Image (cartoon, rainbow, N blue to C red):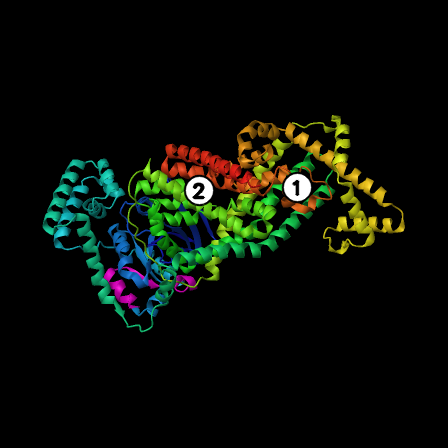
Amino acid sequence: MEIKKITVALAGNPNTGKTTIFNGLTGLRHKVGNYPGVTVEKKVGTRKYKNYEFTIYDLPGTYSLTAYSIDEVVTRDFIINEKPDVVVDVLDSGNLERNLYLCMQFQELNVPIVCALNLSDEAEARGVVIDEVKLSKILRIQMVKTVGVKSEGLENLLERIIDTVENSNTQFCPSYGGELETDISEITKALNSDADFVSKYPACWFAIKLLEKDKRAIELIENHAQKEIVKFKTSEKIKRIEKHFGRDSEIVISEQRYGYIRGATAEAITRKPVLEIDMTEKIDAVVLNKVLSLPIFIFIIWAIFQLTFAIGEYPMGWLETIFGWTSELAGSLMADGLLKSLVVDGIIAGVGGVFSFVPLIVLLFLFISILEDTGYMSRIAFIMDKVLHLFGLHGQSFLPMILGFGCSVPAVMASRALKSAKDRIITVLITPFMSCGAKLPVHILLAGAFFAHNAGNIVISIYIIGIMLALISSLIFRKTILKGDSTPFVMELPPYRMPTLRGIFFHVWEKTFQYIKKAGTIILAASVLIWAVTTFPKLNTDTISYDNLKEEFKKRVDINSIKSEMEALKSGKTVISNIEEPEEKKSLSELKEQLIKGEKTIESAVNEKIEELTEARIETLKQEAALEYSIAGRIGKIIEPLVRPIGFDWKIGVSAVTGFAAKEVVVSTLGILYKVGIDETEESEGLRESLRKDEAFNPLVAYVLMLFTLIIAPCFATLAVIKAEIGWKWLGFSILYSTLGAWAVCFVVYQIGSLFV
């Protein structure tokens, strides 16, 4: 049997459960891209049902099709240009009047529509009873009750889509009253004089858009063959409407739509009294309390980071052990040479270091997904609105900032929802200050290495500094280059909902997969490149003599300390069973037995230990010399004068600069660079231990490196999105501002911190 194909555009207001419906219909059979010409995220999924194959496009959530924001333009242009077989409008059953406003505009476009009356269980719990059969007849649109989180009604929805497409159900344009209909009709007649134009844009819909003074429609009318006549007719009708009704024509059209909707819903909706106070109201009485709201929010964020570190430390340690074992295994199976160095010191050290942080990334995304799915994330934006206004920000700017904790790319894209151009530019410029998931591995690595007992609080402090820098920068921009007041903040607060395992899984999987994908592609390529620049040109270290340094090093060794260690080992005061490393445990056991039997004296054991330390030191110096001779070393020496004032030596400087490509690469670079100085007995101790042993590193330098990674220009992917959103000029400004700002902040912190270290 031939498979028939149906293209579906899934649309609706924000917070109607549209994404849940999309996930329920497509499962994991979807991919993410961008709409042509814009950076708005596009999700496309497929579903096979009976002998039909559905291609489903998840359009951006929007309240109308008026060209105020990029979301609205994208949704509108997709339906006009791509001409899907059917539009599925996902409605919140509990707020039907407001949601049907968008539906009426789809009808004006003369496209086949099916409405999903989603969240119908919540509506009924609040006493809202919808007669979907009667509503379907009144609006002439097929209505289907659904509960997206439970996947209820989805098959029925597919049946209605098939019926609408197969039977070519006649659509009609809603009537907005005799007087307006006459005006619309006359403009429509003028538009119909250009057949090519009306083949692209439905004449009735376009006439209404002109009466609404839609900017996009006014621009497009320039392409009409009889544009002057159309403009004259439109101007004449707008003047008549505004004189007759005493209000702006756009407001009159809006009122007529709502009047039509109220008439339809009055016939099909009944409301039953509900005695019990709504659960959302009970919770909001606490979490939106003027006094308690901010402390509750701060506590929740603090708890998330504490739990992330407390739980994630264990699986992260397991992965570090696995990659350490993999490195040792690969090293033992491969012959010495460039290939072994590439695999062990390049790929495993670089990619393995990034992969080790996957458990923490999963946990952080898990907690953020729970906040999103419960509806608390919207409350956070509401809570922060007054604070943001003090810094010249729009309350809605907080949503991109929150998204920035996951990834800066979708966060920058989310700024398109802001209608004011200045608000949008400011939001795009400050969003990269949020500590995204790519920066988190750097913070975790350094906090774990130098602040082991207080790692959670240290990382939280970095997040807080990022937020404060964003707010201060916003205030500076608003007072200087982007003067003006922020626009008022109006936002819908959805009811609280119990998160579903399915929904959380989809959110966490999508975000974690992007992280893993980056580690397996960009980070892998970067690791190989970094290995190459740290390996070539090669230096023959055997020609270097360190005889003089040997004697100097031996003089600096604390002989008494080593002697005390040997005496403690012989007397049994050293508990060998507490040592985790098998090779070290075996070596100490053998040495203890030799000391007890008299096969070795304390003096000879001390001398052997000194020789061992000396050889290890010489080997470290040779490796450091080879690294300095490499391309990376030469680059590091060039930039060292620039980074020395902020506490970095050339190695730290090289690793910090690689973060311009992708922030995870900082970890990869450190993993490759700090193989230097690790001998065979120390390799299993991991990168954190290697950093602690480097004289160039200390807690202050580690904290400054975290700050530098936080503030410098974001990754290449984010820079590309910034350019697409606000243009080359602002991209250049963003790079310059963040880079100079990173150096200035780190300079102040390091110089002041040095006074107390």
Q: Earlier in the sequence, mark 1 or mark 2?
A: 2
Looking at the image, the residue that sits furthest to the right is 598
Task: Tell me the residue at 69%/46% (across/down).
Answer: 684
Instruction: Give the CA separation, mark 1 to mark 2.
Output: 32 Å
Task: Tell me the residue at 19%/42% (across/down).
Answer: 191
Residue 499 visible in the shown view = yes
Rendering coords of residue 711 (x, y %): 47, 40
Q: Quadrant of residue 290?
A: bottom left
- Determine crowd level at label 2: few under 14, some 14-19, many 20+ residues with C-alpha closer than 10 A: many
Task: Tell me the residue at 79%/51% (across/down).
Answer: 568
Query: SS of the residue at dot 1?
Result: helix
Residue 33 visible in the shown view = no
Amino acid carrying label 2: it is Pro
Task: Tell me the residue at 28%/68% (across/down).
Answer: 131
Which quadrant, please, contains the C terminus? top right
Is 146 colored magenta in this rendering? yes
Rendering coords of residue 301 (x, y %): 46, 55
Query: SS of the residue at dot 2?
Result: helix
Part of the protein shown in magenta:
129-154
Q: Which residue is mark 1?
A: 693
Side of 592 relative to 269 (left or right): right
Q: Which residue is mark 2?
A: 432
- Determine crowd level at label 1: few under 14, some 14-19, many 20+ residues with C-alpha closer than 10 A: some
